[in-house]
Every structure is written in structure tokens, then in C-alpha cells.
Amino acid sequence: MTELDTASIRVTSLSEKDAPALSSFYRTVWNSGSAENGPNEATATGSASCPFPASFPPPLVGVYSGERIIGHLGSIPTEFWDGQRNVGGHWLKGLMVLEQFRNGPFGYLLVKQMMKQVSLAAVMTVAPAARRLFEACGFKDFGTVPNYIALIHPRKVLQAVDVARLGLASLPRFMQLLLRVMQWGPIAWIAGSTGAAGLWLLDGLNRLLCLGLRARIQTDPPSAAEIEPLWLRLRERLTLAPSRSGAYIEWRYARVHPGRYQFIEVRRRHELAGLVVVRRPERVDDPRLAGLRVGLIVDLIVDPADAAAVTAAFLGARIWARKAGCDAVLLTISHLGVGRLVKRLGFVKIPGNVHFMLRAPPGAIDAPQGMERSWMTRGDAWGDDI
Amino acid sequence: MTDQTKNKLEQVFRAVFELPADADVQNIRQISFRKWDSLGHVLLISAIESEFGIHLELATIVQLTSFESVQLYLTENAVDRSAVHG
């Protein structure tokens, strides 16, 4: 176990001069020496592309022991819509202390150091210890962001589901028992085939709801100018949402990681009525997924009151998922209205474990009490790794 | 360390980690006690500083990783000198 150089421990802001030490830290923690693959990947494109210049460059803080970084917390520029106005802020991301130095003061000190440099801040976090830390530093926990899953190959998913590994232990016991029964070979075949037939019928019925709308899968997003009015329509229905302006979508999903995402455009005649950002499954070695290929709906912009557009968007997502070879597709979204709609489209709600937390200085933002009319998705805080 | 100081330290541990009044805290270690996370560590240090009227430097804070190590530190640094030395 590496000893701490206690005489030279310091918590400090990091800059370009710390790049070698950071690179070493990233290699140790994330198996990557490049900042472009680390949690501050948003800075890789530079200030010229960032649609939130007021929040650029995003602060980065670390703990040094001697010449070595042993802990780190990064941030990503963003802007929040609070129902009336946009407010600049930061996502906090990548809170990490080397394993042998955990459970000491460093996590807390990192958050405190970061709080000296940011105003409005938000985080998407899972670990209870991290949530306690952020709460102690003034963050409000708004609860988990719900997940919904649509089965593309029901039989394969049924046979592979491991309740414990997938964190589904909170499902009612009868559902867990039912899952185990349905995993038995012949029953799985019958259940899977029945499920697939049911979904086919459901898709057919839902297509009737979105006549006049057309969904197309694209490799590039629509122009920022086309996305902007769609975002402005959506945000009028929301009490809290990170910005999804045209400039943001272009930066986030086309510039920082070109080729990683695909886009489902929903058009009513020629006007953009919905946009879904999707990502192909990349990791099949995750033991929790038991070999399943799970596609992600990373982001979406659609007026939740436009049921036809919502329907067309998710039908398009299911078609994409089939073409991409997915066994299932996962949606993470906080807006309850969308959650109700997608259940009619073959999505099943499953337990979420990612908590949205927000720290707003007094008067900075008119934050709501709950998340019902908020718009948080898996793409927020750049959290689209399962 | 006198019994009085030791009892005080035990009460601090029980309060910070929300343990019952009769909980045995002498074997608590950061590495193995689930409730001892980063925030728990900071709260513990803050409570120790407050209860014993001392200020701890960061280099010391990171080394206090068990009840035993805290007890040893308080003894070696003669906290509550009259109590420590009787």
C-alpha cells in the first residue's frame, strides 16, 4: 500500500501544469491517460465550441500527496432553465479518490474546494457516501431519475436477467419469482414469443397515433437553428432542465465525440417535431448485463404535450435498436409525463439508482420542489456509460 | 489517558456514527467500519476538535483512522494534560 506523504498533502485547483500528474491519475483510475477520455472530456474541444462561455474553463480540483494526485473532482459547463430564465452553472463529475486513501477527509475536501469556485452546481451520483458528502455541502437531493426499458428480444432478455446483478432486488418478490419461473427454457420461449408478438401489435397500434409524422435515423444531428425552436417549445413546459439548445446539442453530441451517437429526427411535414439521441451498445463485458446488448436513449427533445411526436420518437428508437442489434433499449428521464407515455409504447419502469442533486446559492435559481416537470436524461452530466 | 477522557472520546464516536449508548467503539477502524466514510471522517474530526479544544492539521487528520489511533494521539499530545497524567 502506498504511503501518504503527509507532510505535503494539499488540496488545490488544477490547471495545465498539472497535466502529467493528472494523466497518471487517470491511468490509475480510468485506465486512460488522456483527459479526453476522463471526466473533463468536455474541455477537449476548447472554449471556442463551448456553448456556455461564462462557465468556461470548468474548474478542476485535486489532492496532491507529494508529486502525486490521489484525488480529483472535475466539472462541466452547463446552463439551467428554471422555468423563467437560464442560469449558468456546472455539473460536477469524476469525484474520485484512490482506493487506498478513501473514507478519509479527501472527498469532503475536494467538494469544499470545488464549491469555492462554482456557484450553481449539480451532480448525478449513485454512491451513498458521495450523496452524503454533497448533502453536507449544501446540495439538495431530488431523488432518483427513473429508468424505463423496452425489450427488443424478450426471450433473450428474460433468460439473461440476473435480479441481483442488475440491482432489481427492490422489485416486489412476486415479480422476482415470476422472473425466475419465466427464465426456465420452454416457458422463456413461450413468454418471449408472446411478448414479441404483443410488442409487434402494440407498435402497430401506436403507429396509428402518429400518422403524418416521419422518423428517420441520422448520423448527424439537425442544425442548431432547427433544434433551437424545438428546445424553446419544450422548455416552456418545464420547471427545471439543463439547456438543450441547438448549440449545446451540436457541441455535446457531435463535436466532443464525433460518431459516437446517432440521431432520430421526427418531422411533421418538414418541421422538426422531436429529436432522440441514441448510442449503440459498446460494452457487453459488463457482468451486470449478462451478455445483453443494451442500447441507450441518451437524450431527447420533444414536447411532452405532443403525444404523437413522443410516440413517433420512441417508435423510431425501437426501430433503431432493432437495426443496431440491441436486445433492449434503456431510457432515463425525470419527466413523469413522458414516463407515463412510454409505458404505452412497451417501456417498463425499472428501479433507478442515479440521484440528481443541486446546489443553488440563494436567489440564483427558482428551483422546484420536485422533479415531475423537470427534464433530466442519461446524457446529462455526461453520464451515458452504464 | 484517564477514564474520563476515554469516556468522552467514546461518546464522540458514538454520537458521530449514531451508535447506541452502550456500543463498543474501541475496535472501530476506518478501513472496516461501514459508516466511516469521507463525511463521517470529517464530522468525527470536527467533533474531536470541538470536544477537546484542539486544532488538527491535515497531515494529522489523515492518520487518525481508528479509535485506537485517536486515543494514542490524544495521549501523546497531552490533551487535557491534567487528566492524561492524572
Image (tube, coloured by chain):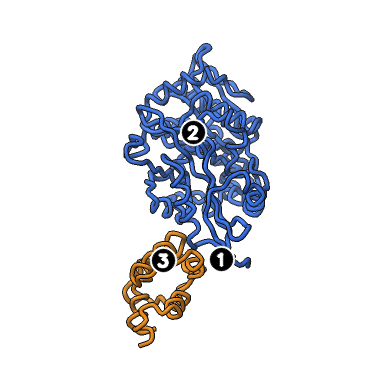
Chain colours: A blue, B orange
Q: Measure how far apart labels 3 and 1 are at the Cα level.
A: 18 Å
Splitting the image into 4 quarters, where does residue A101 fall? bottom right
> Crowding near pointer 2: few (<14 within 10 Å), some, many (20+)?
many
For label 3, the residue is B45
Say if mark 2 contacts mark 1, CB within 8 Å. no
Q: Secondary structure at mark 3?
A: helix
Question: Compared to A300, does A288 lie above or below?
Answer: below
In the picture, measured across the screen, residue A373 lies left or right of residue A195, that is: left
> Crowding near pointer 3: few (<14 within 10 Å), some, many (20+)?
many
For label 2, the residue is A346
Question: Compared to B79, does A281 lie above or below?
Answer: above
- Residue A204 visible in rendering: no
Give residue A7's mark: 1
Q: Which subunit holds the residue at mark 3?
A: B
Question: Compared to A108, does A318 lie above or below?
Answer: above
Give residue A69's mark: none
> In the depicted view, which residue is nearer to us: B38 or A64?
A64
Three-letter amino acid code at the position of disc 1:
Ala
